Image (tube, grey):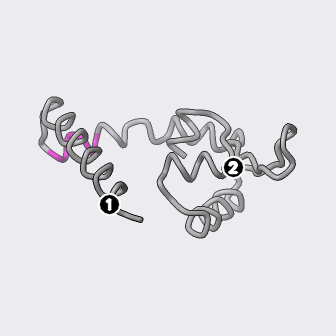
Amino acid sequence: MLVLWQYGPLSVKELGTRLRLDSGTLSPLVRRLESAGLVRRERSAQDERSVIVRLTPAGEQMRTTIDAVPQAIAAATGLTRAEATALVAELAALTARLEKATP
């Protein structure tokens, strides 16, 4: 949901890339979100093979109900903004190294 709120409608492939999830993991998640009425899947007008995932009005509305969650999580960590930023950078670097090492 966060990725769709940030970037708007995305193809399933793009969504998987941004979330670093394979289609076997992502497809059931998207189906559950669709069943809950939060997203809808539709064929791309430009490429019939591509499926686009869009937020529904209910999915858009959900954003306002959880806006405080990231701030609450950040506060619970006890990290300063600088510490959190450094940690995110370290995790990104670790992820990149692991992806490089994976055939």
Q: In this view, does 76 lie above or below 102?
A: above
Q: What stretch is highlighted in magenta?
A: 72-77
**Residue located beneath label 1 in the image:** 101
- Mark 2: which secondary structure? strand
Which residue shows up at 76% across the image and 50% down it?
51
- Residue 76 within the segment the image draws in magenta: yes
Q: Position of residue 63 (x, y in %)?
A: 53, 38
Q: Say which label, 1 or 2, has the lower sequence index.
A: 2
- Mark 1: which secondary structure? helix
Quarter of the image for the C terminus: give it.
bottom left
Which residue shows up at 67% across the image and 38% down it?
9
81 left or right of 100 in image:
left
Q: Nearer the viewer, residue 33 or 15?
A: 15
Q: Position of residue 18 (x, y in %)?
A: 51, 46
Query: Within 10 angstroms of label 1, few (less than 14), some, or many (20 or more) residues?
Result: few
46 left or right of 10 in image:
right
Mark 1–mark 2 contact, CB under 8 Å? no
Task: Give the mark count.
Answer: 2
Which residue shows up at 67% across the image and 59% down it?
36
Amino acid type, residue under disc 1 in the picture: Ala
Q: Nearer the viewer, residue 61 or 99?
A: 99
Query: Within 10 angstroms of label 2, few (less than 14), some, or many (20 or more) residues?
Result: many
Which residue shows up at 36% across the image and 56% down it?
99
Q: Which of 94 and 76 is in front in this view?
A: 94
Amino acid type, residue under disc 2 in the picture: Val
As drawn, the label of residue 39 is 2
As drawn, the label of residue 77 is none
Q: Where is residue 13 in the image (x, y as percent from the top left)?
A: 64, 51
- Residue 50 within the segment the image draws in magenta: no
